[in-house]
Amino acid sequence: MLNFLGINKIKKMKLNIALLATLLCISSSMVFSQGSPEAINKMHDRYYGKWRPALIFTQTTGFYKNDSLQRTETWYEHIVYPKNFRIDFSHPDSGKAVIYKNDSSFLFRNAVLVRARAEKNELLFLLGGMYFYPFDTVLTKLNLYGYDLEKFHETKWNDQPVFVIGAANEEESVNQLWFDKENFNLVRMIRYENNNKQEAIFEDHVLLGGGYVETSIKFFVNDQLVQTEKYHDLDVNTNIPESIFDPYHFKKLKL
């Protein structure tokens, strides 16, 4: 009996060791799989089909030089996700505006088109548009925007846990997106273009229309503050006419 119990204990010990090894392997693979695609998939599952279809707000924009405020402007912004975005500058009926439609931008002065060019609006995609596309399309677009989805790490931002897409650690000088782990809000974006570091900080999120809206943004170039944005009068319960995004039949806004 003693030998039998001893053998059983040894077998049980071996089984426990084998089970522990298996769990460690599974745990390791889960840590490995907690990379960008899985994190993005969780975000996508949370908000896909639930995000607000549209957003209107007024924005106070501050322009800075050498960390000093130079001037402010009021902008009027209309969004219909995922592809339509319009900004009217200074006053809604000024005729000074930019329309982002699909992957192009159209600039107007005095209600006259002065420039049209291919231009993807990455922030429109990252700040809500991504939840209107299938998951595979989201991954494709993030790759096209220059984020390496093979790289991923977790850290803290303002003492809150975040995950970072596009960088394996905080020392890498690569394009990267920082999302908070609780609500998946974008809180930081870093890009490198034309030998410049471009950084955006997104703060003061509020829950509105099925998702969160950042109401304060700071933009930096080479660690120097260049622009701030403050959102006011946010509205999601509205029907925005498609016609205001038509670049070939420009209409002045009437508030």
Image (cartoon, rainbow, N blue to C red):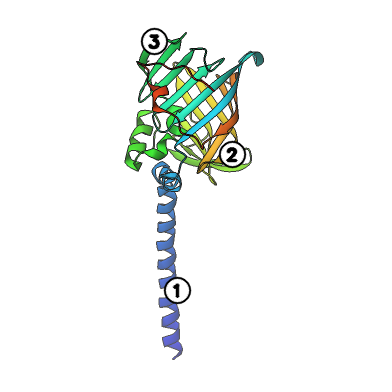
Secondary structure of the residue carrying tag 1 is: helix
Quadrant of residue 4 within the rendered picture:
bottom left
Q: Is residue 59 above or below residue 50?
A: above
Earlier-in-chain disc, 2 versus 1: 1
- Where does the image place residue 218, in percent across and percent down from the top left? 59, 25
Secondary structure of the residue carrying tag 3 is: strand
Residue at image point 44% right, 45% down: 50
Which residue is label 1 attached to? 13
User: What's under tag 2, amino acid-wise?
Assistant: Val
Q: Badge 2 local density, few (<14 within 10 Å), some, or many (20+)?
A: few
User: Does residue 177 show up?
Assistant: yes
Which residue is label 3 attached to? 115
Q: Is residue 3 above or below residue 210?
A: below
Q: Are marks 3 and 1 in contact (CB under 8 Å)?
A: no
Residue extending farthest to the bottom is 1
Q: Badge 3 local density, few (<14 within 10 Å), some, or many (20+)?
A: few
